[in-house]
Image (tube, helix red, strand yellow):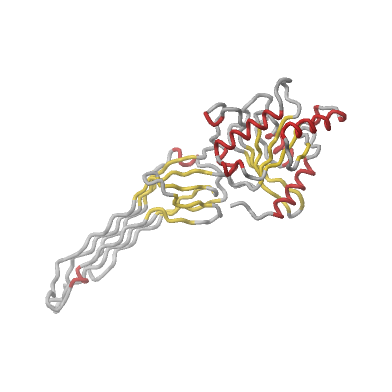
Amino acid sequence: MKFVDEASIRVAAGNGGNGCLSFRREKYIERGGPDGGDGGDGGSVYLVADASLNTLADFRFARRFVAKAGEAGQGRNMTGKSGEDLDVFVPCGTVVRDIDTSELICDLTEPGQRQKVAEGGRGGLGNTHFKSSINRAPRKTTSGTQGESRNLALELKVLADVGLLGMPNAGKSSLIAAMSSAKPRIADYPFTTLHPNLGVVRVGALQSFVMADVPGLIAGAAEGAGLGIQFLRHLQRTGLLLHVVDIAPPDPTASPAESVRAIEAELGKFSAQLAEKRRWLVINKIDLLAEDQRAAARDALLQELGWTGPVYEVSAATREGTGALAQAIMRELEREPDPV
């Protein structure tokens, strides 16, 4: 299924039913009086977070959702049937905004979370409500009110504990494949990853965390170069970022330190909050260097960056160091509260 993380829809609640104009008509009962019932309420529209969904692809074609209207009232003081509410299921992590007012309506992060996005109309009053001592045969009723209609923008931000960040071909997809059961597309050319991938990393019998891999960035991504920065929203909910860097790039003129700085610059252009998130440096592809060269390459990179945070050396190809990295991430996540 194609991954879709943005969609626009229109929701319309049901109208309320009209009140009834009716008078009691029974044999041997003269001037029975008014007995018009009220109209039923219109159905409302709700958005419901569903853990079984991971994309907004269903909204590429189904863009209009209308709840049922309430039925009109009837004689004998019978109230019309209310319209059924309409539940629209969206993935967990969906942010909902009103397109016309830019109002943030809700952020659905928990499975089963339910939010009303369009209020159903109220049923009208039957003529029974208007009888009085001076008006014993009222011919007045009220119409049902219209249901609310809104144009909504849906934006999916995947829910993950850890996010992978780096240049194309830094080995992010290989790393998530080595550490989890995810099977992302892996190839030896840039921009193999075209949409976010999620993988569950199991550390122990009852210990696991979710890792997210997003398409790689290049310098100028904020201006639209490469795949741009449209997928960085999926890292905003993560508690920890792993900045994956290729220690042995195929282009000898490419500096690992320069690639790290380029990503940092693009992060700052996208979101200051994202740029300030906890970030670990993960030096990948150490298997391409001789053992006596690894320490020197690592020290040179850290010195050039002035890096003082946590550093881990791994090889996604041979899985060297991935176990220790997973254990360290688990300890960090258990120490810190869950990301909002």
Tell me the quadrant of the picture where the N terminus can be found.
Answer: top right
Q: Nearer the viewer, residue 140 or 263?
A: 263
Q: Quadrant of residue 220?
A: top right
Tell me where residue 294 appears, x and y as whole percent.
Answer: 83, 31
> Residue at horizontal 66%, vertical 42%?
241
Q: Does residue 340 appear to the left or right of 323 in the view shown?
A: left
Q: Does residue 174 appear to the left or right of 90 in the view shown?
A: right
Which residue appears farthest toward the right when viewing the image?
A: 292
Tell me where residue 289 appears, x and y as whole percent.
Answer: 82, 27
> Can the viewer see residue 88?
yes
Tell me where residue 26 appears, x and y as whole percent.
Answer: 17, 75
Q: Nearer the viewer, residue 58 or 265?
A: 265
Q: Nearer the viewer, residue 118 or 331?
A: 331
Q: Quadrant of residue 120?
A: bottom left
Task: Work out whether 46 lies above or below 6.
Answer: below
**How many badges with numbers are in the image?**
0
> Residue at horizontal 37%, vertical 53%?
67
Task: Work out whether 55 lies above or below 68.
Answer: above
Task: Work out whether 96 lies above or below 321.
Answer: below
Q: Quadrant of residue 231?
A: top right
Tell me where residue 316 appears, x and y as whole percent.
Answer: 75, 34
> Residue at horizontal 66%, vertical 24%?
189
